Image: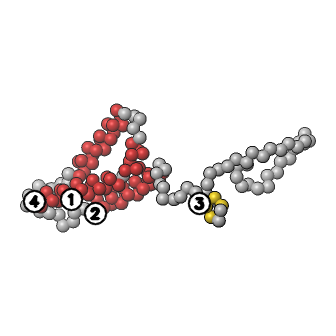
Amino acid sequence: MRRSSIVAPLLLIAVGGLFLARNLYPDIPLLDYLAKYWPFLLIVWGGLRLAEVMFWAATDKSVPARGVSPGEWVLVVFLCMFGASMHAVRGFNTWWPRNVTIGGLDMFGESYEYPLGGEKQVSKTPRIMIESFRGNA
């Protein structure tokens, strides 16, 4: 009989539990939780695989030559790419500073409105020419 891993069924149960929680409580921000805490999936997965291999070794079953199969490595890479992109898209990335000050100039700071007003008498067919396309015109 072929030995199978317990990680895949537990992962399927966890995904089903998340779907059930989303149906019972629609206000739960599951995507925010997933974007923020996705590295813990890797930690839990590695811990389960370690416990599995240790259990096989303790019960004198044959221990696999590699702890993680190549397909699982591909899944780890995809999970890392998906988790990092979700983290960036949901706005939890704080590694890039919000405001950069170079020589007293605020490079990526807050937007500012310049409340300048002006009136001028014009003819019936006024012609407006915008000379600079910087900012919101």
Residue corresponding to mark 4:
58
Q: Nearer the viewer, mark 1 or mark 2?
A: 1
User: Which class describes the residues within 10 Å of circle 4: few (<14), some (14-19), or many (20+)?
Assistant: few
Earlier along the polypeptide chain: callout 3 or callout 4? 4
Earlier along the polypeptide chain: callout 1 or callout 4? 1
Residue 20: name its quadrant.
top left
Mark 3 to mark 4 CA distance (whole Å): 56 Å
| Residue drawn at point x = 8 percent, y = 61 percent | 60
User: Which class describes the residues within 10 Å of circle 1: few (<14), some (14-19), or many (20+)?
Assistant: some
Residue corresponding to mark 3:
100
Mark 3 to mark 1 CA distance (whole Å): 44 Å
Q: Quadrant of the N terminus?
A: bottom left
Which amino acid does the dot numbered 1 rest on? Leu
Q: Are marks 3 and 2 in contact (CB under 8 Å)?
A: no
Q: Nearer the viewer, mark 3 or mark 1?
A: 3
Q: How is the image coloured?
A: secondary structure
Mark 3 to mark 2 CA distance (whole Å): 43 Å
Q: Secondary structure at mark 2?
A: helix
Which amino acid does the dot numbered 4 rest on? Ala
